[in-house]
Each structure stands twice: as C-alpha cells, then as structure tokens.
Image (spheres, rainbow, N blue to C red):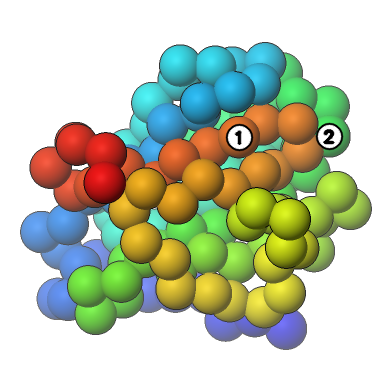
C-alpha cells in the first residue's frame, strides 16, 4: 500500500508541478498545481482529469514534489503507467522533460519555469 505524499510541506510550497498532454485524446492540455501533489485519472477527484481516454483509470497515477525531485507512482491502474517501454513499478523519481504514458495519453513533465528540459 502506498502512502499519500504530504500537501503543502515546507519543501514544496514554492514549487509548481506542471504537466502537458503531448499526444492522445486531450492533446495540448496543460495542467499545473502549487499544492505539490497531482492526482491523474478519470475520476472527479483528480487534479488532472483525462476523462476522454477510456484506458485511463479513475485514479491512475500520482505525481508529487519532494526535496526538489518530481516523483511518479502508478496507483494500480489496469493499463499501467509507462516511461518509454518500461512499466512503472512502485515509486520513481523523474526529471522535467520526462514523457510518460497513462492509458492512450502521453504526458510530459514541464520544468518549474514553464520551459521544457
């Protein structure tokens, strides 16, 4: 069972977590949060709702900031979360510019200043 990353801890308060859909049914959508945590999925409680992709789970993946790193975790989705040809297992730190797949949607993590790395 995965633990929920804390919201608004002192390490993350000044950081923006930004993701762009780069391919898929919602291509071009950009979402950001200053909360330090982003829940991705089809469900109404998700920060980034990918409701036009039927292969995305209700709660598909989570991104969060911790000690200057972006972490990603699949939340047990049937289709999985993929980075390149590797299925994400557990939690993984990633950097800006990383592209990952949830369902049929490709997403890119964007640097805090809005520029791609």
Image spot of residue 18 (x, y percent): 32, 42
Residue 59 visible to the viewer: no
Residue drawn 47% across the image and 59% down it: 63
Residue at 31% across, 59% down: 36
Image: 11 above or below 109: below
Report which quarter residue 5 is drawn in: bottom left
* Label 1 secondary element: strand
The answer to whether 33 is drawn above or below residue 24 in the figure is below
> What's the CA distance linking mark 2 and mark 1?
12 Å
Please say whether residue 103 is visible from this viewpoint: yes
Residue that carries the numbered disc 1 in the rendered image: 106
Badge 2 density bin: few <14, some 14–19, many ≥20, Cα 10 Å: some
Where residue 16 sits: x, y (%)?
A: 21, 49
x and y, in percent, of residue 21 in the image: 50, 28
Residue 55 circle label: 2
Position of residue 107 in the picture relative to residue 71 (left or right): right
């Amino acid at each position: 069972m995965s633990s929920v990353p804390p919201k608004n801890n002192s390490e993350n308060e000044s950081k923006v977590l930004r993701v762009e859909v780069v391919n898929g049914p919602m291509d071009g959508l950009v979402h950001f949060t200053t909360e330090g945590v982003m829940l991705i999925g089809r469900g109404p409680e998700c920060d980034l709702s990918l409701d036009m992709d039927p292969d995305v789970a209700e709660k598909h993946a989570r991104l969060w900031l911790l000690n200057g790193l972006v972490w990603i975790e699949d939340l047990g989705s049937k289709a999985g979360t993929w980075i390149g040809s590797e299925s994400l297992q557990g939690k993984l730190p990633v950097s800006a510019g990383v592209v990952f797949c949830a369902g049929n949607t490709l997403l890119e993590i964007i640097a805090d200043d809005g520029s791609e790395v």
